[in-house]
Amino acid sequence: MNFQQLRYVRETVRQGLNLTEAAKKLFTSQPGVSKQIRELENELGVEIFVRHGKRFVAVTEPGKAVVEVIERLLQEAENLKQVGREFKDQAAGTLTIATTHTQARYSLPKVVGAFKRRYPKVHLTIKQGSPPQLAEMVIAREADMAIATEALDNYSKLLALPGYEWRHCVVVPAKHPLAKEQRLTLETLARYPLVTYDPAFAGRSRIDEAFRAQSLVPNIVLSAVDSDVIKTYVELGLGIGIIAAMAFDEKRDRHLRALEAGHLFGTMTTRVAVRRGAALRGYAYTFIELFSPRLSRKLIETALAGKAETYEL
């Protein structure tokens, strides 16, 4: 038994039992992957996968138990490496953040600036995607943490902690009739074409729920993942926009007006998620605390140890 065999099994499961894709990810050949897995099965005395010809079609019952142990073993092996890196040079290394456009554009610049001043030798990478994609990046160890509003607390393999709260606003052209409204209602918004987020992003689910609760059908003419795209199309007259309030800048968006909408859609929570069982570098804790001062290293370590299941703002 060796770590190569364990990695081959894990990657095969991650690629939906597609040996060709697993081989590509592992930079090896499909026969090589199949051979190593068969050798491990022979050593263990159980079949991990159900086969149909040369294809894997399912994970066997004993295979499910084997995969769980493999995940733990490889996680602990990575944790050992992290311990070595931490004590070898506490101020150098890499840190990969998986996040959405809105967070990268509006929430993270000051955090990144402060972090780089403190850790100039750490190579920082920011990857963007949808919240489900971000979660999978962390689970697959392609990122150290994910930051998003939607979806992160739906994954059992992740510890998702609340970072900060925010609300939506409605954006309209400066001369739009709604610019003079004192207090918006959902009934009023339903009369206009709307431009807002894609269903996977930035509290869109809460927007849909609010209209549905009032038995209203919003006329959403454009969905986007990017707040700046939404504002651009509002300026072009396509409709009125619903965006995260943090994404409105009075100087930059001087041709638009932002109207309070928190009373319509409630308060959103942006969360920071890390892999359960992961050993984080010291500077990773620092990044999280710069992003959300409430999330101290002690609190995160306690939660990762399973001593605190939930934490609310």
Image (cartoon, rainbow, N blue to C red):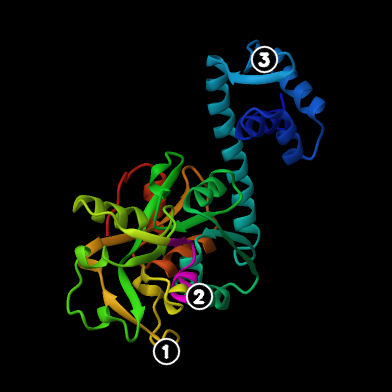
Q: Is residue 309 above or below residue 97?
A: above
Q: Nearer the viewer, mark 2 or mark 1?
A: 1
Q: Which residue is mark 3?
A: 51
Image position, residue 310 (x, y; %): 30, 47
**Residue farthest to the top?**
45
Q: Residue at x 20, y 71 (%)?
A: 184
Residue 239 in the image: above or below residue 199: below
Q: Which residue is tagged 2?
A: 109
Q: Callout 3: few (<14), some (14-19), or many (20+) C-alpha neighbours within 10 Å? A: few
State left or right for residue 147 relative to residue 209. right
Q: Give SS at disc 1.
A: loop
Question: Which residue appears at 61% of the width and 44% of the height?
Answer: 78
Q: Earlier in the sequence, mark 3 or mark 2?
A: 3
Res. 74 image quadrant: top right
Q: Amino acid at mark 1?
A: Lys
Q: Earlier in the sequence, mark 2 or mark 1?
A: 2
Residue drawn at the location 73% of the way across and 32% of the way down: 4
Badge 2 marks a residue whose secondary structure is helix
Which residue is depicted at the point 55% across and 54% down? 144
Dot 2 crowding, Cα within 10 Å, few <14, some 14–19, many 20+: few
Residue 67 % position (x, y): 57, 26
Q: Position of residue 178 (x, y in %)?
A: 26, 78
Q: Is residue 213 left or right of residue 4?
A: left
- Foreground: 209 or 135? 209
Q: Nearer the viewer, residue 70 or 59?
A: 59
Mark 2 vs mark 1, CA separation in Å: 17 Å
Amino acid under disc 2 = Pro
Q: Pointer 1: what residue?
A: 251
The magenta stretch is 222-232
Which residue is nearer to you in this view: 135 or 64?
Answer: 135
Q: Amino acid at mark 3?
A: Arg
